Amino acid sequence: MKVYRLLIFLFTLLFIACSGEHSRLDIDTRDIEIPSVHIRRYEKALFEIAPDSMQAMAKAIAPEFPIFLDADLDDTLNIMRLHEFVAEPLNQQLYQKSQEVFPDLTTYEHDFTEAFKRFRYFFPDKALPDVFSYVSGLLYENPVQFFNEDMIIALDMYLGADMEAYRKMRLPRYAIRTMAPEYIVRDGIHEMYLYHFPLRHGTTFLEQAIDKGRQLYFLDALLPATADSIKIRFTQAQFEWCQQNEANIWSFIIQNDLLYSSDMQVLRKFFADGPFTSDFSTASPPRIGEWLGWQIVRSFMNRNEKVSPEELFTNLQAQEILKRSGYKPKGEVAP
């Protein structure tokens, strides 16, 4: 009997160890019923209209694409604007490239459907969006947006890092790197968080770190199969650098009294995008404060199983999350 109990105990320990730190997010979505996501392709509907049929066809497709065509289509000026947008050479190029890169969106529809199932599980009272794609004319600052309850995705902002039009915009390489297909669902789900939950930018390092950590935990909850490096928009090497230097990062923050700092220069250094974080090596990623907040929030949720994701996103203060997280950085501080 003692041997049997010992085996049960060892098996339990093994199960806990193998289940990983995100075990509370391991849910079965097979019985969650939602409509499968169908991404409505406004760019195809618009750019395939013959120039001499613009007004009639715009009216015909308007009921399917009210977000884009909620205007007086009997107004000649509005029709002229549609003509000009479609005829613009850059927009024609972006449309043709979008059709090459995204001949169909089945993979993305599947991934959004799975993410929306998880959203419905964790937040059963919140609405799910309809999803539309379009060509924006390089709307860099808003590649994914919510209008009312609908999500719109600018496919021309995800055509790949080798897209010449991106370089002509004089965007930095670290920004262009994430303008690729593998970031579409990640960005869509991140925008979903921003739509449904209040941002808490805060004035201190800790408050901003925890706010970013909440957002990344939302991605953990809805996109468990997505690589962590994609979630936080690091290269794999940058992500591994953080893992290897976690103790050094925390030690630097504590020793320099940065955790409660509200110095704007400090906040920019640790939360603004860039090629790397200047207080560390050039192998480091930018936004290290964001990564650190993520680890604290993960630790908090692992230790406080009665706290729901919605409570995390809406009710709890940064200091309480840190206090109850029991956060301990992995690794040892380098001499």
Image (tube, grey):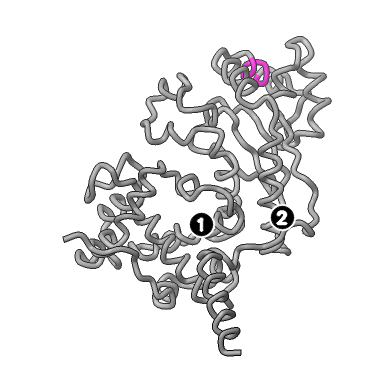
Image quarter for residue 51?
A: top right
Q: Amino acid at mark 2?
A: Lys
Q: Which residue is mark 1?
A: 215
| Observer able to see residue 204 | no
Q: Tell me the magenta residue range.
A: 81-86
Could you tell which of marks 2 and 1 lies nearer the N-terminus? 2
In this view, the residue farthest toward the bottom is 1
Q: Which residue is mark 2?
A: 117
Q: Nearer the viewer, residue 72 or 45?
A: 45
Q: Is residue 305 left or right of residue 331?
A: right
In this view, the residue farthest toward the top is 52
Image quarter for residue 109?
A: top right
On the rendered image, what quadrant is the N terminus found in?
bottom right
Residue sitting at x 59%, y 68%: 24
Q: Amino acid at mark 1?
A: Gln
Q: Nearer the viewer, residue 82 or 42?
A: 42
| Observer able to see residue 4 | yes
Q: Secondary structure at mark 2?
A: helix
Disc nearest the viewer among 2 and 1: 2
Residue 4: x and y in percent read: 60, 84
Residue sitting at x 39%, y 77%: 323
Residue sitting at x 73%, y 17%: 48
Residue 245 in the magenta stretch? The answer is no
Residue 43: x and y in percent read: 68, 25
Q: Nearer the viewer, residue 47 or 106?
A: 106
Residue sitting at x 58%, y 71%: 311
Image quarter for residue 97?
A: top right
Residue 147: x and y in percent read: 65, 44
**SS assignment for the magenta stretch, majority:** helix
